[in-house]
Image (tube, rainbow, N blue to C red):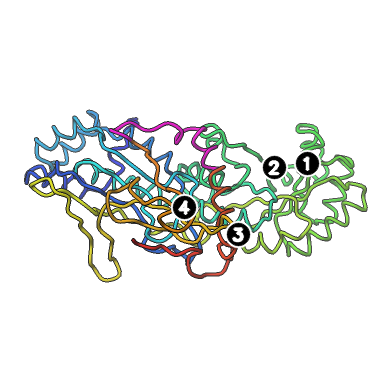
């Protein structure tokens, strides 16, 4: 199977290239921006995720014989366009918000500077990756904060597509989750994996005791025993009898969790298993995690909610042409004016502003010379820092953004950036963005 990403795109991207080549406008220098007009779900902030995956996709965006033969059979492109695609590789520049960074409405998360034809080809794959991954990361970030420092594991593989599950595990890990149940995510991205047994393992055996004995024999007393297949109280008693007071943990996957957790904690302590931890699952989201954060829960396993963005499966990002050169080589700002879909034309740079305590106060977007062209913090009368970083220069992916190195950097970046936000950002209620976006 081809490893090319070139057909992870929409039909009309290629017909636009075909028409632009015919019209002589395909080589016009252009600037495309990927951004969200608003924060879907009335979230207070968004989290950038998928950047490393996008850069990998850009590096593999080539039309080899397999792709070209298929397109030739479809018959909707001219021979000259197929020849152009055969020689294609992205040779432009890409700037963007580094992975793990937070964002707000209008934030130019990805800025592509290239010819029109090169830039337009990346539209669909860029939106596919960042819309989905950022939705997962934003939900995961909210859950991580709601957990108040207690670890969360991502367990949602069976609730999304098989490849989406791997990407979701990656995005959740960047946004604060500590592990995943998905082995491919562990292999591909180096994310810690976890898991012990499901209810089927208990049902396989003639009794709950037999199941626990088999699991402890295989995995040792530090394992996690699932205690709610039948009766939770009896399950806890049997678990301690089988594994002893050094039982690692019990998992609860049903019931009125705040009440059940308190009862299980008391029972474990009464049985002398004071060091045995409690992990809970059962269709958790940020709201149930927050409700349980003060309960004697030691860790959480989140499935469906995190991989579908907790009700917001996409961030509503768009990819728009914002500037191009004319026939004389002069830059022209362009923008869409449709009702409710207005975009802001022009090349942009971004600085985030902070108060004296280091708390973010605004996202300042400057129209002008593009990335790196914003005034210094002193000129703004505030502490400020550049947000955009170079991701691709002259077609070459810049180091530090891909692979396990990129994930580690993104995870730490996310931790730092969320800590800079005002307290209102952590609210789980719908509302305005935590800081305003200001165009200057």
The answer for how far apart the CA atoms under marks 1 and 3 are is 30 Å
Instruction: Please report whichever mark, 3 or 2, sits nearer to the chain's N-terminal start.
Output: 2
Dot 1 corresponds to which residue?
Answer: 211
Segment tinted magenta in the rendering: 393-411
Estimate the x, y position of residue 333 in percent, counting from the top left.
20, 56
Secondary element at tag 3: loop
Residue 431 to residue 226: above or below: below
For disc 4, the marked residue is: 384
Kindly state the secondary structure of the residue where label 4 is placed: strand
| x, y percent for residue 175 | 55, 48
Indicate the position of residue 36 as horizontal and vertical percent values. 37, 58
Q: Is residue 164 magenta?
A: no
* Residue 394 is covered by the magenta coloring: yes
First-in-chain label (4 vs 1): 1
Q: Is residue 389 above or below residue 294?
A: above
Horizontal side of 268 relative to 386 (left or right) equals right
Q: Nearer the viewer, mark 4 or mark 1?
A: 4
Distance (Cα) linking label 2 and label 4: 49 Å
Q: Which residue is mark 3?
A: 285
Spatial separation of the CA atoms under disc 1 and disc 2: 10 Å
Read off the residue under disc 2: 197
**Helix or strand or loop: what does disc 2 sit on?**
loop
Give the position of the N terminus as an image quadrant. top left
Of marks 3 and 2, the one in the foreground = 3
Mark 3 in CB contact with mark 2 (< 8 angstroms): no
Residue appearing at x 22%, y 66% in the figure: 337
């Amino acid at each position: 199977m081809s490893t090319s990403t070139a057909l992870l795109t929409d039909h009309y991207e290629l017909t636009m290239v075909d028409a632009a080549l015919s019209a002589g406008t395909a080589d016009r220098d252009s600037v495309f921006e990927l951004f969200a007009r608003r924060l879907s779900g009335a979230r207070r902030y968004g989290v950038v995720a998928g950047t490393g995956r996008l850069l990998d996709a850009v590096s593999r965006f080539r039309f080899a014989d397999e792709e070209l033969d298929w397109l030739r059979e479809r018959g909707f492109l001219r021979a000259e366009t197929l020849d152009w695609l055969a020689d294609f590789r992205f040779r432009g520049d890409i700037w963007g918000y580094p992975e793990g960074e937070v964002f707000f409405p209008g934030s130019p998360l990805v800025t592509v500077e290239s010819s029109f034809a090169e830039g337009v080809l990346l539209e669909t794959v860029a939106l596919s990756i960042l819309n989905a991954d950022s939705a997962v990361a934003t939900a995961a970030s909210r859950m991580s904060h709601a957990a108040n420092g207690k670890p969360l594991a991502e367990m949602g593989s069976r609730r999304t597509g098989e490849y989406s599950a791997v990407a979701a595990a990656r995005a959740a890990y960047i946004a604060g989750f500590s592990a995943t149940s998905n082995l491919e995510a562990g292999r591909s991205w180096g994310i810690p994996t976890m898991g012990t047994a499901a209810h089927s393992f208990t049902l396989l055996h003639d009794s709950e005791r037999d199941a626990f004995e088999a699991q402890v024999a295989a995995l040792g007393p530090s394992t996690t025993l699932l205690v709610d297949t039948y009766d939770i109280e009896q399950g806890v008693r049997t678990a301690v009898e089988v594994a002893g007071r050094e039982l690692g943990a019990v998992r609860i996957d049903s019931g009125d969790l705040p009440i059940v957790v308190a009862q299980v904690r008391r029972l474990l302590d009464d049985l002398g298993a004071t060091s045995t931890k409690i992990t809970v699952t059962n269709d958790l989201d940020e709201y149930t995690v927050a409700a349980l954060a003060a309960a004697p829960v030691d860790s959480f396993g989140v499935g469906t909610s995190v991989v579908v963005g907790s009700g917001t499966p996409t961030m509503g990002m768009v990819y728009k042409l914002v500037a191009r050169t004319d026939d004389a080589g002069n830059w022209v700002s362009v923008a869409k004016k449709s009702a409710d879909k207005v975009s802001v034309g022009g090349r942009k740079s971004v600085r985030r502003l902070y108060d004296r305590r280091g708390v973010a106060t605004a996202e300042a977007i400057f129209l002008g010379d593009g990335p790196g062209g914003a005034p210094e913090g002193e000129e703004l009368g505030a502490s400020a820092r550049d947000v955009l970083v170079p991701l691709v220069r002259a077609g070459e992916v810049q180091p530090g953004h891909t692979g396990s190195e990129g994930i580690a950097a993104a995870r730490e970046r996310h931790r730092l950036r969320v800590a800079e936000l005002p307290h209102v950002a952590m609210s789980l209620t719908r509302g305005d963005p935590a800081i305003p976006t200001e165009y200057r």
